[in-house]
Image (tube, grey):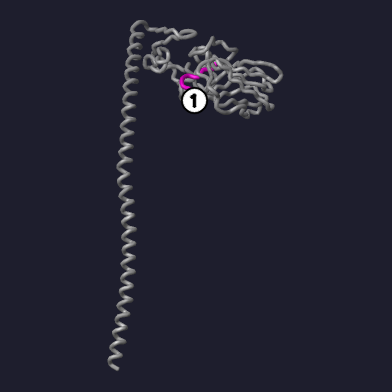
Amino acid sequence: MKKGIVIAAAATVVALLVIHEWRLSREVATLKADRDNMAESVKALDQQLQAIPQEIKEKIDKAQSDLAVAEVRMNAMTAKAAALEQQLQAVQAQAPTARTSLPGGSRTLQPKTGTEPQQSPAEFASVFPKRGRWGPEEVTGPPDTDGAGDIPTAWAAWRPDSGPEWLKLDYDNAVNIAEVRIRETHNPGAISKVTAFQANGEEVVLWEGTATPAPAPNDFVVPVSQHISASRIKVYLDSQRVSGWNEIDAVELVGKDGTRQWAKNASASSTYAEPQNTSGFDSFSTYRVLR
């Protein structure tokens, strides 16, 4: 009897040991799986950490390269500015008034006295008095710019590549518009939109888009199919689309009745005919004349 009890107890102990061993083996397997997963995670993090210095190094190398290019350009601009300054000093030393030839005419540079009225570009959005030399009044009447080029008988904005600019034109008679014909004489292709003002003052878009650059002189023609009666036209330009001054000589308004009109008045967002500053010669204007 006692022997049977002992055997049963021993069997129970053995069973418990087997169960405990099985549990331990499962826990060991789980720990090994966790260890393997952690090792993969550590390996992935290590790879990411190794990639970060390389990415930073590439950015540093690019920044150094860009800096070197900028320094070269700055040195070139400094040398050019010094050469222009020497030319300006030579002109000032020769006479109080310097005259430099330009294609299609010449422009006189006058030393400033410090008493000239100062006007901002925004003040030039009103109708300009007769000033000449790249002013918006140069767009009134029929074309008078012979050929292509930077010629003062056409309108030019205050600065080249400055972004949005506009030119507004008034005509004697309101007509049902058939076409608007814009004569571009220098760096065509910057026109971005053409509108008309109806009698009630509403501004209607006749055309908007990207003009194709073409050799100057170029007639940019905007055909109008809808019924729009107006005597005021506005031409918008994005001067950054085509490098350099974008100059317009005349804008013709063609009616569906066959009538043709040239602008009688013109105003603009800005003009190269704006007055210079009071500190001697205006450096920006001088650059344009001497270039």
Image coordinates of residue 235 in percent, x first then y, are 57, 23
Q: Residue at x 58, y 24 (%)?
A: 234
Task: From this view, report whether residue 67 is shown above or below residue 147.
Answer: below
Dominant secondary structure, magenta: loop
- Mark yes or no: residue 137 visible: no
Task: From this view, report whether residue 57 is shown above or below residue 128.
Answer: below
Q: Quadrant of residue 230?
A: top right
Q: Residues within 10 Å of mark 1 (few under 14, many from 20)?
A: many
Residue found at the far bottom of this picture: 1
On-image quarter of the N terminus: bottom left
Image coordinates of residue 2 in percent, x first then y, are 28, 92
Image coordinates of residue 9 in percent, x first then y, are 30, 86
Residue range (magenta)? 241-248
How many numbered dots are placed on residues in this image?
Answer: 1
- Mark yes or no: residue 180 visible: yes
Residue found at the far right of this picture: 257
Q: Quadrant of residue 290?
A: top left
In the image shown, does 40 or 126 lie closer to the viewer?
40
Per the image, label 1 sits on a secondary structure element best described as loop
Compared across the picture, whether 170 is left or right of 149 comes to: right
Q: Residue at x 65, y 17 (%)?
A: 172
The amino acid beneath tag 1 is Arg
Compared across the picture, whether 9 is left or right of 182 comes to: left
Image coordinates of residue 157 in percent, x first then y, are 49, 20
- Residue position marked by numbered label 1 in the rendering: 241
In the image shown, does 105 or 281 lie closer to the viewer?
105
On-image quarter of the C terminus: top left
Compared across the picture, whether 68 is left or right of 282 comes to: left
Q: Residue at x 32, y 80 (%)?
A: 15
Q: Per the image, is 130 magenta? A: no
